[in-house]
Image: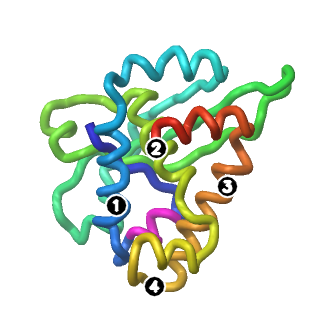
Amino acid sequence: MQKQVTTAEHERALGTGNYKAVADRRASIARNIASETKLSPMLDEMGIRVVVERSDNRPPTWADGKSHGKHYRVTVSRYIDGELVAPLRFDYWGSKRDSDLEVEPTREDVLICIASDSSFPQTADGVYSEFGEMKPSQAHAIAKWAVRLTAWFTPAELEELAKLDQ
């Protein structure tokens, strides 16, 4: 099940850019995961807590006024060596299909998107190379989000996330 996840910067980046390339990449990751329930032990082992809260009815800017899934606010948190790491907070939109079926996103759905996004190029040039033409501000925002994810997760966590992107 494919989900879209975005921060304010990432949302703007996907606004008029090559969203299809990003969505295709996420879909390939979702196909590589045999069962979402297998992710739960990995999240528990990492000590990652995901809270998904229903937000408003605002559509994503990249939806161009078309009907879309529900808007959520996500907080991802964890402790390292007994210290709370500053949580990641970002906007998240479920799919239109999930909205129609009243299916709520799971923490595994969020992790699938984070797995994809954490492997995005970390420079604007790399983003152009991988995703194609887009506004410079969009490429910078996507790269900035990838850098943010790379800084937030430990090397071991990134290694586990990378396994989802194979």
Q: What element carries label 2?
A: loop
Mark toward the start of the polypeptide (1 vs 3): 1
Discs 3/2, front: 2
Q: What element carries label 1?
A: loop
Pointer 1 residue: 60
Q: Is residue 94 left or right of residue 125?
A: left
Q: Which residue is drawn at 46% across and 32% down?
A: 52
Classify 67 as above or below 37: below
Q: Which residue is drawn at 48% across and 78% down?
A: 128
Q: Main secondary structure of the magenta part?
A: helix
Marks 1 and 3 sit apart, C-alpha to C-alpha, by 21 Å
* Residue 32 point in image, percent of width and height: 34, 36
Pointer 2 residue: 165
Pointer 4 residue: 135
Where does the magenta region start and end? Answer: 10-14
Do tag 3 and tag 2 residues touch (Cβ < 8 Å)?
no
Marks 3 and 4 sit apart, C-alpha to C-alpha, by 20 Å
Q: Is residue 4 left or right of residue 126?
A: left
Q: What element carries label 3?
A: helix
- For the residue marked with disc 3, what is the amino acid? Arg
Numbered circle sitting on residue 148: 3
The 10 Å Cα crowd at callout 3, few under 14, some 14 to 19, many 20 or more, is some
Q: Residue at x 32, y 47 (%)?
A: 28
Quadrant of the rendering where the C terminus is positioned: top left
The 10 Å Cα crowd at callout 2, few under 14, some 14 to 19, many 20 or more, is many
